[in-house]
Image (cartoon, coloured by chain):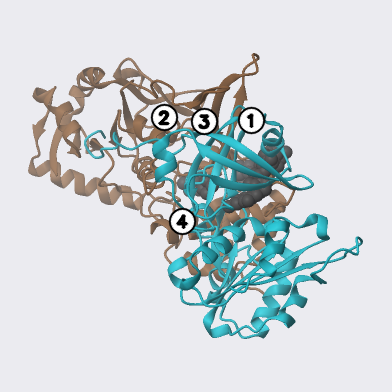
Amino acid sequence: MSDAHNYTSDENPYLPKPARIIRTLPQILDHQLFQIRFEKEEMINNFTYRPGQFVMLSVIGTGEAPFSISSSPTRPGIIELCVRRIGHVTNALFKLPPNAPVGIRGPYGNGFPLDKLEGNNLLLVAGGLGMAPLRSLLRYALDNRSKFKDVILMYGARNPDDMLFKYELLELIEQPDVKCLLTVDTDNSGMWKAHVGVVTTLFDHAEIDPNNTYAAICGPEIMFKYVLEELLKRNFSKNRILMSLERNMQCGVGKCGHCMVGYKYTCLDGPIFNYWDAINLPEMV
Amino acid sequence: MKIITLPKENFAEFVGHLCSFGEIHAPIKRGDRSFVFAPVKDASEIELDCVRTILPLKKYFFRPMEVMFNFCAGEGYEIPSEVTDKRIVVFGAHPCDIHGLNILDMVFNGRYVDTYYLARKSKAAIIGLDCIPDDLCFCRSTRTDFVDTGFDLFLSDIGDKYLVRVGTSLGDDMVRAAESLFYEVQKEDRDAYKRKSIERRESFKTEIQLQDLPGIMDLEYESQVWQDVGETCLSCGTCSMVCPTCYCYSVFDELDLDGSSGRRKRRWDCCLFKDYALVAGGHNFRAKRSSRVKNRYFHKQRGFVSLYGRPSCVGCGRCKAQCPSGIDIVDVITKLRSETRV
Ligand SMILES: Cc1cc2nc3c(=O)[nH]c(=O)nc-3n(C[C@H](O)[C@H](O)[C@H](O)COP(=O)(O)OP(=O)(O)OC[C@H]3O[C@@H](n4cnc5c(N)ncnc54)[C@H](O)[C@@H]3O)c2cc1C
Ligand code: SF4
Ligand code: SF4
Ligand code: FES
């Protein structure tokens, strides 16, 4: 069939590009922020992405796994991944020595629909590790502040020691151009100055206009359920509620089949879905 | 399309000429009633009446297991120096087999191009051959009983000759390499072809209505049928391995004993395996067998339609033929269609 197709110029989409972990910043127990830089100058200069996209990270000799990019494209040069240690690949990642080589390919997935979000209020609701992709969007919005109306973050953790990006978020509380609402389920230290209670209680502290707002929710399923109730009660349209789906991903490029939900590849058509599209996917919500 | 004829007495000689286009692979007998695509030296080994081989043609282009990269600690991943330089000529691909390859072409092309599959595919010539359906074939229902692209040559038996459709320039090269063996189409050949075509159409014993199936599948999403099939399915994965259009795979790194070099490989995977949709932390999106069975049917008959504009089942009957539990796709769909719930 040689004359029907001409593929020779296409590069291998599975090839991890050489990169290095230039710094690791411990976050909370079993969570670290990895700062990664490509080895090749042209990759450093040309790699750009949208908040909400992910990369496939290879630990050489162990395997590959998808991670949301936590940094913002407004700060090019390094990629930040906030990783929870949970299994095969992540265990090996946490054991790597300083400056270790890794492989990165991507960015993949749709990311947040920035063109739609711009000109609107942003309501970011995160729980636990859900902060990882939302931190990218938050940073992007703050670096492009004039493109958005109000920016509100609601982030809940179990206790103060469980809060990712804690110090940088605590600083935001003082900042006038963003409403940063942080809460913990319980505080045994007695030192916690922000809110206590589940994330939905934060809704009492913010005025939200459903017609001019996009909500982006990332977090555990149970949190998702309650936040959704809250938003629907406030008459949010389903397509103004955005969520990030997690699925098993072996390729990231729409081939291996693993991330398929009904009629969508999470890796190509997602991982960001609006709630309307998500309820129309079988096995969802 | 260029159409010519090849008298059957010239067939063996023509196959002899094909060697210069690559190693010839064709259906041969393996065991009592099973057939496989395997290398052949000459025409006499080819089982022209084979209805279906155990494994479909995907095995040539999307290998059951293959090396994607070599790696070395500190150096990262490298593409193996050559995927394959070997040219092959696949002889005896049936219309459904070719449709299966056309479907894989769609999947492995697209925004990201699977270079492994396409490199191999671009080195193969495909010669199709018409067939007479058995009880398990339902390619008429899936509209894959006739094929007009995806082959270099296609042979249809019209009695003492083959009618040969030339699909590509490579096909034309193969004909020209043995030009004296071929003849122009005569009126009697046209008549014979049309007669055969009707005969073939009438020989289908299995028929199901598939055109409106996506809608029915949405409607019967909670059907008891899925529970019932789930109870019988063993999650063995055979149906996916033998399916010409199942393309799922998983990826893993294999470390050598030196602890620093090795290979990244991929191998066929199956959505019916229990851990297929497992994500880190232990959550399994399809922990129940019934939900995995449903997912497989849903993907083939419903999801694929939304993604690529057509169902991915080509009606070859392999899944039924090989399932150790005797699960029959036609039966499942028929039940789904006729089920009335209380
Ligand atoms: C779009 C997306 C974004 C993500 N973003 C982040 C992020 O920002 N931060 C983060 O920490 N995580 C993120 N994740 C989750 C992350 O990808 C997983 O935590 C990671 O894959 C874990 O890899 P592991 O090898 O350490 O875990 P493991 O559980 O060892 O293995 C990973 C995969 O192997 C498979 N597996 C597990 N056990 C078995 C078994 N017994 N047999 C066969 N296969 C098995 C599972 O299917 C699992 O998906 C994201 C996931 C997706 C899809
Ligand atoms: S071959 Fe049959 S038993 Fe095995 S996974 Fe497929 S349907 Fe289930
Ligand atoms: S699902 Fe069964 S009948 Fe359909 S193409 Fe696959 S193996 Fe053939
Ligand atoms: S991750 Fe392989 S298809 Fe989406």
* Host chain of mark 3: B
Instruction: Point out the frontmost of discs 1 and 2.
Output: 1
Q: Quadrant of the C terminus of chain A?
A: bottom right
Q: What amino acid is found at the position of numbered circle 4 in the picture?
A: Phe
Q: Nearer the viewer, residue B123 or A86?
A: A86
Instruction: Give chain A's shade.
Output: cyan
| Label ID, residue B64 | 3
Q: What amino acid is found at the position of numbered circle 2 in the picture?
A: Tyr
Residue that badge 2 annotates:
B60
Q: Is residue B163 left or right of residue A55?
A: left
Question: Mark 1 and mark 3: span between their CA atoms?
Answer: 21 Å
Label 1: element kind: loop
Beta carbon at label 1 within 8 Å of ligand 1: yes
Q: Residues within 10 Å of mark 2 (few under 14, many from 20)?
A: some
* Labels 4 and 3: the sequence-earlier one: 3
Q: Which chain is brown?
A: B
User: Residue B177: x, y in percent?
Assistant: 13, 22
Residue B322 visible in this rendered orientation of the protein: no
**Residue at 11% across / 26% down in the picture?**
B176
Residue that badge 4 annotates:
B304
Q: Residues within 10 Å of mark 4 (few under 14, many from 20)?
A: some
* Host chain of mark 1: A
**From the viewer's perspective, is residue A59 above or below residue B224?**
above
**Residue at 60% across / 65% down in the picture?**
A243
Residue that badge 1 annotates:
A62
Q: Are marks 1 and 2 on the same chain?
A: no
Question: Mark 4 and mark 2: span between their CA atoms?
Answer: 23 Å
Q: Are marks 1 and 3 on the same chain?
A: no
